[in-house]
């Protein structure tokens, strides 16, 4: 029992541990102005913006935990015990951030409140690098005033462009979904998902040119056209994917990869349907018809021919075995995207035959029952 209580106390201490130093009128002057510079947040416990900043501020302090002897990351409850300090430093709203130099002199911090901006400001002030891991490169193609025309106005490309701003809450909410969509369409060289920081000074004229007056603003540049259309659809992953599939003529699936219809050719699906229920000479004739049609139908049609050849040769259980094999590979997703796309198309085409098989089975059962 004593051990359990001790363990609980230790666990609570670990959970509550923070690298943000809490300052009060009693300890403020023993820390600030004593040779170490630092960032101080004046907050109020009830303040919504303070609550939003809190986890970011904790991450900031964690990222500089290795340099506690060189820089201070602190906070003051300026509506509680630290109220006199808030008055002393002219705090009129929450949260207020101030940078204190090593000698105690201070200046307001008016920069962004995201982790990268806060960390970058400290690095600039004191020449210390944080332990923040560099984020992975964006899936979205980042464009600016210098690169925009070569991509968005390329006559061979369809390009969806979001104009955003770093401080925009709606943009931040949309970003994870937009990144997923960009990843999904990465294999499509002529269907691009791009982004422009419309609030960046160098991109202001570009944003104005396309009538961007709020963020996010999303526009679609169709290949062969220099005039974009406004994207007015929903902002879910499914909405973006459906829009791009329609505009680009693609068959991408929500979550990545290809849809269940990718690679399917209606005229060959019809042949597959006839082929499965045919026998002997009839199958040979249909195979010849398919081979003739494939001459002008493209590479995908060859997959239909391969299945037909296997069935003509009487390969036992080919449909079922090959379907299971391909589905297993697709579930593992360990191959390159282009290879997975190829396998998905083969799997879809196999389904053109297996779906016919299931229909035949159901019809046979129904006819038997009626007899």
Image (tube, grey):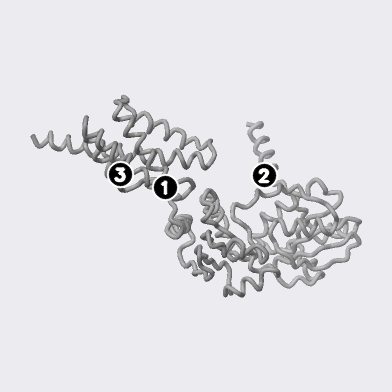
Q: At 52% from the left edge and 65% from the top edge, which residue is drawn?
A: 221
Please provide percent x and percent y for residue 368.
Answer: 12, 33
Crowding at dot 2, Cα within 10 Å, few <14 / some 14-19 / many 20+, comes out as few
The mark closer to the camera, 2 or 1, is 1
Q: Which residue is mark 1?
A: 259
Please provide percent x and percent y for residue 282.
Answer: 21, 34
Q: At 79% from the left edge and 71% from the top edge, which residue is drawn?
A: 87
Please provide percent x and percent y for residue 352.
Answer: 32, 41
Q: Earlier in the sequence, mark 3 or mark 2?
A: 2
Mark 2 → mark 1, Cα distance in angstroms: 44 Å
Mark 1 → mark 3, Cα distance in angstroms: 16 Å
Determine whether label 1 and label 3 are within 8 Å by CB: no
Q: At 78% from the left edge and 53% from the top edge, which residue is drawn?
A: 21
- Where disc 1 sits, the SS reads loop
Q: Is residue 20 visible?
A: yes
Q: Which residue is mark 2?
A: 15
Q: Nearer the viewer, residue 43 or 225?
A: 225
Left or right: residue 365 versus residue 236 is left
Q: Quadrant of residue 293?
A: top left
Crowding at dot 1, Cα within 10 Å, few <14 / some 14-19 / many 20+, comes out as some
Q: Which residue is mark 3?
A: 269
Vertical placement of 16 versus 111: above or below?
Answer: above
Q: Quadrant of residue 163?
A: bottom right
Q: Earlier in the sequence, mark 1 or mark 3?
A: 1
């Amino acid at each position: 029992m004593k051990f359990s209580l001790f363990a609980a106390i230790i666990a609570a201490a670990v959970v509550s541990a923070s690298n943000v130093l809490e300052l009060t009128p009693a300890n403020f002057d023993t820390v600030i102005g004593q040779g170490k510079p630092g960032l101080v947040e004046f907050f109020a416990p009830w303040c919504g913006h303070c609550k939003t900043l809190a986890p970011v501020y904790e991450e900031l302090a964690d990222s500089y935990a290795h340099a506690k002897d060189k820089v201070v990351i602190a906070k003051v409850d300026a509506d509680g015990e630290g109220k006199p300090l808030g008055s002393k430093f002219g705090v009129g709203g929450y949260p207020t951030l101030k940078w204190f130099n090593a000698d105690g002199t201070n200046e307001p911090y008016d920069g962004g409140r995201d982790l990268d901006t806060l960390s970058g400001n400290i690095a600039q002030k004191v020449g210390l690098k944080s332990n923040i891991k560099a984020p992975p490169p964006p899936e979205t193609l980042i464009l600016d005033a210098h690169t925009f025309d070569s991509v968005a106005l390329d006559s061979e490309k369809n390009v969806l462009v979001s104009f955003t701003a770093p401080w925009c809450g709606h943009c931040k909410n949309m970003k994870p979904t937009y990144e997923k969509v960009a990843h999904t369409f990465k294999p499509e060289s002529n269907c691009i998902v791009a982004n422009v920081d419309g609030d960046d000074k160098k991109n202001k004229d570009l944003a104005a040119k396309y009538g961007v007056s709020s963020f996010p603003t999303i526009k679609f540049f169709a290949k062969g056209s220099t005039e974009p259309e406004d994207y007015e659809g929903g902002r879910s992953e499914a909405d973006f994917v459906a829009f791009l599939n329609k505009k680009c003529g693609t068959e991408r699936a929500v979550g990545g990869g290809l849809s269940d219809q990718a690679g399917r050719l209606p005229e060959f699906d019809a042949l597959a349907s006839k082929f499965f229920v045919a026998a002997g000479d009839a199958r040979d004739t249909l195979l010849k018809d398919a081979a003739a049609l494939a001459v002008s139908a493209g590479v995908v049609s060859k997959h239909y021919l391969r299945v037909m050849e296997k069935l003509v040769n009487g390969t036992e259980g080919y449909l079922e075995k090959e379907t299971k094999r391909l589905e297993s590979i697709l579930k593992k997703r360990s191959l390159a995207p282009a290879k997975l796309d190829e396998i998905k198309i083969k799997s879809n085409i196999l389904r053109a035959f297996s779906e016919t098989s299931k229909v035949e089975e159901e019809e046979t059962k129904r006819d038997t029952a009626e007899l």
